[in-house]
Image (cartoon, rainbow, N blue to C red):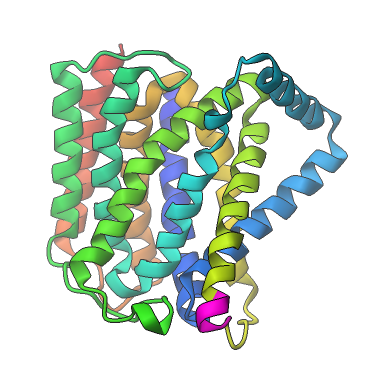
Amino acid sequence: MRLGLFAGFGIGAGVAVQGRINGALGARLEDGIAAATISFGVGLVVLGVAFAVSGRLRDGGRRVRLALAEGGLRPWQLLGGLCGAFFVACQGLTVAAIGVTAFTVATVAGQLLSSLAVDRLGLGPSGRTPVTVVRLVGAALGVAAVLVAGFGHHRATGGLSVPDALRGTPTVLLIALPALAGIGLAWQQAVNGKVGAVGGAMSAAMVNFCVGLAGLLVIEAVVIATSGGPAAFPTEPWLYTGGFIGVAFIALAAMAVRWIGVLLLGLTSVAGQLLASVVLDVLTPTSAGLSATAIVGCVLTLVAVAIATRSQS
């Protein structure tokens, strides 16, 4: 379990860093969907190279296809990438407007609550996990922690990276988007874990990126047809590294969810996101700065993880 907990922290830190990168790219392009499409495209290229040079990875892909043909995997279990695409799109669309902390608050609130349902229904590879009082307390404390961390950052700042026709969206709706994405993340982690149990973590990541990129290309085609594409692309290489980070944390999540379940993975990744946000605010401060409530939220989340861990022992 300890390895799973460390993996969860690493995933959360990766999500925070990816959110900062994709949010900046979306703001520069003035198109959050384009930023998400680029992120997924880069990730798919990385995975394509890895599969081309590794016979072991190709064997994993064949096992997934065989399981799908024989009924061991259902087609709907391959659609986790759509939730991942929506999450990355929300990064590009809203982070520049509401900030990393508010984005994390909304995402985590949705993720923690839906994790309880996903574990209870047994959608993940670890099967059904009972919703005990301890687990409920841990999830509730986790939600309270992110609300505390986001207190004082409720006002939208920056620009919204959406087409002109969608500008002027109320702030409450901007926060609702990542909340919906967080609900989808728990389901994505569960079904990716199912795929990973059959073909390995990298196969789960490959399926995730293929499906997600297909969905994003359709949406971006509509955006380009109605509002036009980005006028120019930034030249800074770091703005295009979100896909690399996405490959790493999706593959890691497909393994970790088998070890610690969806709820505990959600809690540990929350702690990783909040702690990484503090580090990012110290090393690369934004206009919002580092608030005392964010630090309190981190501490509360660590307590929530400790409580949830007791229910797994």
- Figure quadrant of the N terminus: top left
Residue 24: x %, y % from top left? 46, 73
Residue closest to the eye, 241 or 120 = 120
Displayed quadrant of residue 6: top left
Q: Residue at x 45, y 78 (%)?
A: 27
- Figure quadrant of the C terminus: top left
Whether residue 139 is in magenta: the answer is no
Residue 221: x %, y % from top left? 59, 69
Q: Residue at x 37, y 74 (%)?
A: 96
**Residue segment shown in magenta:** 224-229
Q: Residue furthest bottom?
A: 231
Residue 8: x %, y % from top left? 42, 35
Displayed quadrant of residue 238: bottom right
Residue 187: x %, y % from top left? 40, 34
Examine the residues drawn in magenta and state their main secondary structure: helix
User: Would you say 307 lies left or right of 108 here?
Assistant: left
Vertical position of residue 194 compared to residue 108: above or below: above
Vertical position of residue 66 compared to residue 76: above or below: above
For the question of whether residue 3 can be seen, the reply is no
Residue closest to the eye, 236 or 289 = 236
Residue closest to the eye, 168 or 257 = 168
For the question of whether residue 103 can be seen, the reply is yes
